[in-house]
Amino acid sequence: MTEIETMDRAALIAAWDEAFGTPVPKRLSSPFLHRYLAFEMQAKECGGLPKGFVGKLEKAAREDRGTNNPTLKTGGRLIREWNGVTHVVDVVDGGFLWNGQRFTSLSPIARAITGARWSGPRFFGLKRSA
């Protein structure tokens, strides 16, 4: 286990290839590779994952169609931290209240906070990215 902690990226890539027989997925950081490979080694040393665990994960992934669409009710509150600042948005009749201003959509609020064109529901964690 200690040897994984000291591996450079080239060694991590070689260890991944040996463990999985596939190239490392793009954009995986070295710290993530360290953790993932350490977990894989530990799981193998301890006899692998519990019986049926992978099947349960696959079943859960098939059943999750991203239909989790929370209904925002008047009086609800959305809280999002951005660049060290906590932003609070209140759900009011017909829209949202942020910094004393009323909005009919979350997207202009997300845009005002970030300076970029964000999907408001995605920015506030109400929708997952595709």
Image (tube, helix red, strand yellow):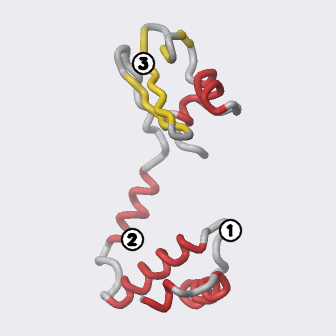
Q: Residue 26 appears in which quarter of the rendering?
A: bottom right
As displayed, is residue 114 above or below residue 66? Answer: above
Q: Kindly state the secondary structure of the residue where label 1 is placed.
A: loop
Point out residue 43 in the picture as x, y percentages from the top left corner.
37, 83
Quarter of the figure that contains the N terminus: bottom left
Q: Residue 10 appears in which quarter of the rendering?
A: bottom right
Asked if one can make out residue 28 in the rendered structure from this viewpoint, the answer is: yes
Mark on residue 83? Answer: none
**Cα separation between marks 1 and 3:** 39 Å
Point out residue 40 in the picture as x, y percentages from the top left corner.
44, 81
Mark in front: 1 vs 2: 1
Q: Kindly state the secondary structure of the residue where label 3 is placed.
A: strand
Point out residue 31 in the picture as x, y percentages from the top left corner.
54, 72
**First along the sequence among labels 1 and 3:** 1
Mark in front: 1 vs 3: 3
Q: Which residue is identified by label 2? A: 54
Instruction: Tell me which amino acid carries mark 2.
Output: Val
Mark on residue 90? Answer: 3
Mark on residue 26? Answer: 1
Q: Does 107 sit left or right of 116 as displayed?
A: left
Which residue is pictured at 69% across the width and 30% down the height?
115
